[in-house]
Image (cartoon, rainbow, N blue to C red):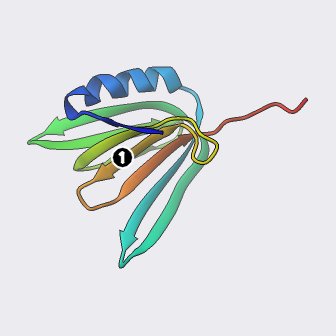
Amino acid sequence: MAENIDKPEWKEFLRNFSTRHIGERTRLGVFDIRDGVVNDLWIEDGVPLIGIDIDTKEGKRTIGIAFENFRHSIENVLKIIQVNDSEEVGEGLDIQDDEGKTTALRFENYQSED
């Protein structure tokens, strides 16, 4: 299940989301549709989340996602969708920009084997 986050709530939502998930291991990918073909680029896997913030200057919204050893920025954000935990995609965020790209942040779920 997915929930669209309203723009006036973005700053507070991202602050709370970061607090809940700080230190969790992540996966980060960027998806782009060109000529009807989905291109995906998985940027990282297994790196702990440090935090997520938003900067609004001159009417443009930029989201920064900080990880243990790097930072990823998404400029001209149009939509933030919270993706609830499911077996298919895992919990996280889909962040869409004005060029049609979607950045997918997911959390790795480690389960201990008995």
Q: Residue at x 43, y 30 (%)?
A: 51
Q: Where 93 sits versus 41, above or below? A: above
Amino acid type of the residue tagged 1 in the rendering: Ile
Q: x, y (%) of residue 74?
A: 32, 49
Q: Quick one: which residue is furthest to the right in this view? A: 114
Name the spot of residue 9 as percent of width and height, x first.
Answer: 25, 26
Determine the image quadrant of residue 107: top right
Badge 1 marks a residue whose secondary structure is: strand
Q: Position of residue 44 (x, y in %)?
A: 56, 51
Q: Would you say 40 lies left or right of 114 here?
A: left
User: Farthest bottom residue?
Assistant: 35
Tell me the residue that label 1 is attached to: 95
Q: In which quarter of the view is residue 33 placed? A: bottom left
Between 83 and 30, which is closer to the camera in this rendering? 83
Callout 1 environment at 10 Å: few (<14), some (14 to 19), or many (20+)? some
Q: Residue at x 52, y 25 (%)?
A: 22
For this orientation, the residue located farthest to the left is 58
How many tags in the picture?
1
Q: Nearer the viewer, residue 27 or 73?
A: 27
Q: Residue at x 52, y 55 (%)?
A: 43
105 or 55, which is in the foreground? Answer: 105
Q: Quadrant of the C terminus?
A: top right
Q: Residue at x 8, y 42 (%)?
A: 58
Left or right: 68 with respect to 78?
right
Residue 14, above or below 107: above
Q: Quadrant of residue 48?
A: top right
Q: Is residue 40 above or below residue 102?
A: below
Location of residue 80 in the rendering, given as x and y in whole percent from the top left corner: 33, 41
* Up/down of 49 relative to 104, above or below: above
